[in-house]
Amino acid sequence: MTSTERPTALQLTTDLSQIGAVFNDAVRLSDGGLWDAPILTVGNNQVPYEQTYVTDLHAVQEDIGSILATGTTTANGITTTLNNVEIGVLDMVSSQVTQLIADAPGSVGNTPTAIADQLAIHTIESQILAEVNGNTGLHGILAGLAYTNTTNGLLDVGFQNLPKADANVNHATALGATLVQIGEVFNAASDLATGGLNHSNIGTFNAEMVAVNTGLNNILNSPTALAAIEAGETPTQAALTTIHLETVQQEVSLQITDFDNQVLNGSITAPRSTNDNLLDIIDIINGDPNLAAAAGATVVNGAATTSSIGFGEFPGYLTGPGGAKLGGTIEQFQDDQQQTNFWSEFIAGANDINTKLNQVADGVLTGNCNITALEQEITAYTTLSKSFDASQGGIFGARFDNELLQGTESVDSSNALTALNSIMTHGLTLANTAQAKAAGMGFVADANDVSGNNLAIGGTTYNGASLTVAGATTPGGVATTTMINQNPNDDTFTPANPPALTTLASAQQVQELINHGTVIGTNSAIFTSDHWM
């Protein structure tokens, strides 16, 4: 049986599927490019991708060597003798993996040598996948040993082909383009990014992402197209599907306006940002049943059973023992004290806002004054999220920009505020109550995402369901300060009513304020945990 647990998967084996699962892990790491910035990862438990990539490939190389030494491979304990053609393919792959190992360290950065190595990695990875899957015997062995993707529960195979791509951008921008067509152009961009983005390919990549952005906006601006995608859903489910598609569009836009520029400017964290963003986009589409179906997936009983065609998935990363992140390819982010303070506020705030949004939608929390107060709370919460993220930068920003700076949280907040404004103007309707509840579900999902991807100070876990800052970590009390006004009676996230905010703060001022238990407000205006200023 193919193991997706990293400690087991890296052990010496002659199981072709197991070897392919490790190679899949390496290819997923290379989407966006490899990075190696250990100085930025001190204390955060983040291993640079270049190091992990090379570790994966050494295991693949040694395992293939074991197969070549005997001319046999194993599958579920059964030994199969390979013919000369199959052995020849694996011998070629072994040599190509040797070249990948040699190219990986030099591929970090944006020098001419780095660009050449990035392009070589892209080419060689593609060749290996084509060679293995082009051999009937090897492909047949792998097809019979599908294993579960640790990210979304779908089935993967060793040495899995990259998603089906369409580099014709006109197919994404044409009016009436489907999510399959738009997604296949996205696949072309994501496939191109394997090995790394640089001055030689960023133009093509960017053009494809711009086309995807246009196509997504065309759907979002078409009630008919949205209704077709959301057919069969309840109003709240449909509103949440819209939120998911808006989040994808925002993350595509963030790639175009921010991460692509990071590539051009030689940012050492640009590959990490792009990798996280592209894979997150794929996961959002495949995680929403109606979006997955519209993108070409098979959906049974409300869940995708195959990957979508457009926005096709990459095989999942290897995990730690028992499926945990600890010990896996992508470790949880170890937060320092200020980051712990922030995430504790983030979790408590998300759950508090969700509770109140549902109270408004259910007619329990009424009156324009109360609804306005909730709008102010959401605005302050969004401000806190964006400001803190912008102040951190580095690997923190690379991992969480698409959640905090533009994307997930921004879309949740925008939909919540739109729904609340509609409720104050028109009263409760089927549409605005569904939108409010869907936005609340988004906030809760964000809080739970944090609890799974981060560790609080000292290795403490987060409680994604907490309504209080103190309860946001398990055990509680790890967060030592609050970053925004809170109700002294119940410790929930309830910011004071702010005046119009206009005072701008520099990045340095922001960090100084955070270091002293304060953060910034809307448009980088300053507020403290005790009062607005």
Image: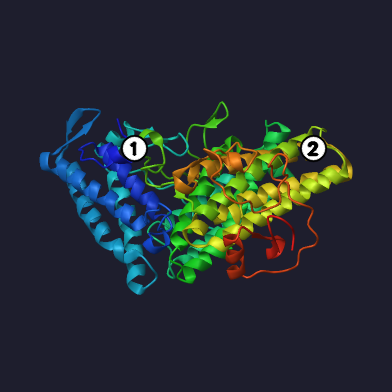
Tell me if residue 221 can be seen. Answer: no
Return the mark for residue 360: 2
Q: Distance between the residues labelled 2 and 1?
A: 44 Å
> As drawn, which residue projects farthest toward the bottom?
112
Q: Where residue 171 sits in the image (x, y, percent)? A: 57, 54
Return the mark for residue 28: none
Q: Is residue 298 above or below residue 118?
A: above
Instruction: Identify the mark nearer the N-term, 2 or 1.
Output: 1
Q: Is residue 177 above or below residue 122?
A: above
Q: Which colour scheme is used?
A: rainbow
Q: Where residue 342 sits in the image (x, y, percent)? A: 59, 51
Q: As rendered, which of 403 and 347 lies closer to the eye?
A: 347
Dot 2: element = helix
Q: Where residue 176 sits in the image (x, y, percent)? A: 65, 49
Q: As rendered, which of 175 and 391 lies closer to the eye?
A: 391
Q: In this view, does 49 lie to the left or right of 453?
A: left
Return the mark for residue 5: 1
The amino acid type, in three-letter code, at marker 1 is Glu
Q: As rendered, which of 472 and 475 lies closer to the eye?
A: 475
Q: Residue at x 87, y 41 (%)?
A: 367
Dot 1: element = loop
State the quadrant of the N terminus.
top left
The amino acid type, in three-letter code, at marker 2 is Val
